[in-house]
Amino acid sequence: MDAAIVRWLNDGVGVIPWLDDAINVVVSDYFTPVALSLLLLGVWFGGKTTASRELHQRAALIAMLGVAFGNLAVQIIGAFTFRDRPFINESLELLFYQPTDSSFPANPAVVGAAIAAGLWGANRLLGAAAFVLAGLWGASRVYAGVSYPTDILAGAAIGIIVVMAVTLVVRRIEPLPTMVIQLAQRFYLA
């Protein structure tokens, strides 16, 4: 079923040139990660009151830790499993370069979901926007022929689960997170 979905989506490549151009922007290693990073940066420095700023900074901290530990989980899983990319097994039109790492789980989905889940904890609107952007990133990777749908779903699940675990740990090690944020504030980094 995974391969059928990839083939079905990839059949659209070349049919609507402006769509391919838009997908090329979203699927790239630059646009979506930079957009999500700028969103995190805005959240880190945003907030109208001291309390809301600290809430946003805590969410950004949780999101960044979620990305770090999510990437660690991908590395661990990758050490035990390897799944070929769709363009290896299928005859597809590529819109992206040919990655050589394992297709499963999709690291971009881990990153996007971790950032979105982290932001969701402080600001539902920004979290929803990040989830939409992460979803577009994942869907564009399937359309471009570099990931299977289950790679994206597994990566998103890892990102969300890791953020949930990080949130629990951050609550248990309080006041350390507050001290980190206060230290950043003293050096005008927050």
Image (spheres, rainbow, N blue to C red):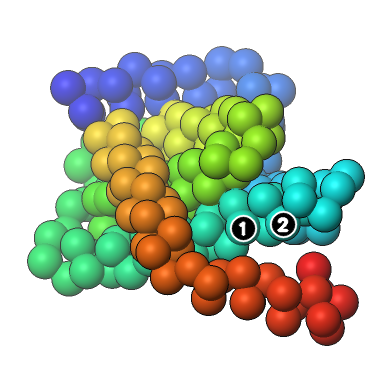
Identify the image quadrant of the C terminus. bottom right
Tell me the kind of residue under disc 1.
Arg
**Residue at image x 41%, y 25%?**
10
Residue 173, image quadrant:
bottom left
Q: Position of residue 102 (x, y in %)?
A: 26, 58
Residue 178, image quadrant:
bottom right
Q: Is residue 157 above or below residue 104?
A: above
Mark 1 Cα within 10 Å, few/some/many (few <14, many 20+)?
many
Is 110 on the left-hand or right-hand side of 95? left
The CA distance from mark 1 to mark 2 is 6 Å
Tell me the kind of residue under disc 2.
Glu
Q: Secondary structure at mark 1?
A: helix
- Of 80 and 26, nearer the camera is 80
Q: Is residue 105 above or below residue 91?
A: below
Q: Are marks 1 and 2 in contact (CB under 8 Å)?
A: yes
Is 13 on the left-hand or right-hand side of 182? left
**Residue at image x 82%, y 81%?**
186
Mark 2 Cα within 10 Å, few/some/many (few <14, many 20+)?
many
Q: On the image, numbered disc 1 is attached to which residue? A: 58
**Residue at image x 47%, y 49%?**
114
Q: Secondary structure at mark 2?
A: helix
Q: On the image, numbered disc 2 is attached to which residue? A: 54
- Of 84 and 91, nearer the camera is 84
- Of 51 and 24, nearer the camera is 51
Identify the image quadrant of the N terminus. top left
